[in-house]
Amino acid sequence: MSTSNKRAPVTHFHPISSPDYVPLEQLRELQSRRLAHMARRAYENVPLYRERMQAKGVTPDDIQSIDDISKLPFTMKCDLRDTYPYGLFASPLKDIVRLHASSGTTGKPIVVAYTKEDLSVWDEVVARALAGYGLTKNDIIQNSFGYGLFTGGLGLHGGIERLGALAVPVSGGNTERQILLMKDFGVTAISCTPSYFVHLIDKAQQMGLDIREFPLRVGIFGAEPWTEAMRAHMEDAAGIRAYNIYGLSEIVGPGVGSECWTQEGMHIFEDHFYPEIINPQTGETLPDGEEGELVLSTLSKEAMPMLRYRTRDITTIERDTCPCGRTIRRIRRISRRSDDMLIIRGVNVFPSQIETGILRVEGTLPHFQILLTRSGGLDQMEVRVEVNADVLGDTIASIEGFKQKVAQSIENIIGLHIRVTPVTPHTLKRSEGKINRVVDLRNEGK
Ligand code: AMP
Ligand code: ZN
């Protein structure tokens, strides 16, 4: 079968819901109403927001229109950590029906919450994303994002069911089985991290199978940055069209934004999540078309409103309207972050967490380097760490035992098993300015 036959037709798809196409004036009016309500809800129910707004001399009465958004204070990841676990909730626990969690900058995760209505909005935006790829109730969608506290699995799942498509909730891992199920069930679309899909392609080849011959025609990829080169590789090797989906737990999870058939930027579902771009150094708002840090505000979230959340993701809001006809704006693909967060196999990892894990083991020194590579499509992480010679011992067993101890200590914090290489003191290069502990060679190959 030729790859081109299987590609989703490049046409206008029937929107399952109209907010993507409403006239701009109507959209701004809706956003204004929702923001005024959100600011009041946050002010009245969350002490942190009330204190921040008071410190800026702002009351909910000052927020009448979407243009007033710049009067509101920013929210940051550390605010979620400092109010851990329930301090930012604007609903009583009895009205909250789901929690998810994601990595914070230190040992504790950040916690996010949803009411029934919040889950319904989440399902709706994911379903709108899927409809934008031309998927319908006739599709069979294998969801290989991890189910659990991570928002990927359950987030996609809800949207698939809302669309009325058939969900195959395989979650992550067990790659051979994933490939067999994909083939046997006649799966037409898959959702997972792009790096996992590259791994899946390699594994299928090893098994003597050609995914291009499967009915699969759409890939839904997100949770980590990827490139046009990756898109070309995946589309070619699997005979699919590969679409980018964006999101973050603090706002809702996947489905904050998503590509349409043009594959040129991700539409933000801005009737629910309002985007701004700021200069990350000064906090000043930048006009559409300029690159900076993406700031998002939830406009309808009940359980955990987010006012001007600094995502640390660097992008640009497109100035032009999209040929697809949607009026909601688009952001360019996220190329990098303004902090040092790494995304390894879809898991957020901060170098500070590695440092904590290392230093919990006796005999380690605070000099380490993180080496990232990619093999068979999967991210590999190695940590080189300086160690006092006397704790290592001189037998193979004692050295192996030490490596395991450090690896386990890091795994306890980040949840990933990584390779540890002890090195003698003063081997690693010392920094002469701002330290950069990360050597990222993941995009050197494909
Ligand atoms: P989490 O809250 O654990 O889902 O992580 C959210 C972060 O993952 C975002 O702030 C981004 O840095 C990253 N991310 C999610 N989706 C994408 C995407 N499609 N492209 C690039 N980065 C992404
Ligand atoms: Zn579009």
Image: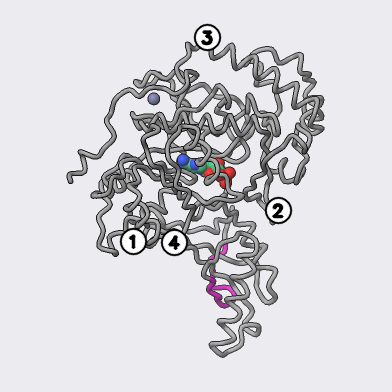
- The answer as to whether callout 1 falls within 8 Å of ligand 1 is no
Residue 44 in the image: x percent, y percent?
A: 80, 25
Relative vertical location of residue 441 with respect to residue 276 in this rendering, above or below: below
Mark 3 and mark 4 in contact? Answer it, CB < 8 Å: no
Residue at image position (75%, 46%) is 85
Disc 4: which residue: 174
Earlier residue among tags 3 and 2:
3
Q: Secondary structure at mark 3?
A: helix
Question: In 3D space, how far apart are the residues under numbered discs 2 and 4 (Cα atoms)?
Answer: 28 Å
Question: In 3D space, how far apart are the residues under numbered discs 3 and 2 (Cα atoms)?
Answer: 43 Å
Our reading of the magenta stretch's main secondary structure is loop
Which of the two discs, 3 and 4, sits closer to the camera?
4
Disc 3: which residue: 25
Earlier residue among tags 2 and 1:
2
Disc 1: which residue: 203
Tag 3: residue type?
Glu
In this image, 254 relative to 202: left or right?
Answer: right
Classed neighbour count for the residue bearing mark 2: other residues with Cα under 10 Å, few (<14), some (14–19), many (≥20): some
Residue 72 in the image: x percent, y percent?
A: 70, 24
Classed neighbour count for the residue bearing mark 1: other residues with Cα under 10 Å, few (<14), some (14–19), many (≥20): some
Question: In 3D space, how far apart are the residues under numbered discs 3 and 4 (Cα atoms)?
Answer: 49 Å
Classed neighbour count for the residue bearing mark 3: other residues with Cα under 10 Å, few (<14), some (14–19), many (≥20): few
Quarter of image, ligand 2 = top left
Residue at image position (17%, 44%) is 2
In this image, 267 relative to 423: left or right?
Answer: left
Query: Which residues are the magenta region?
Result: 420-430
Earlier residue among tags 2 and 4:
2
Disc 2: which residue: 108
Residue 416 appears in the figure: yes
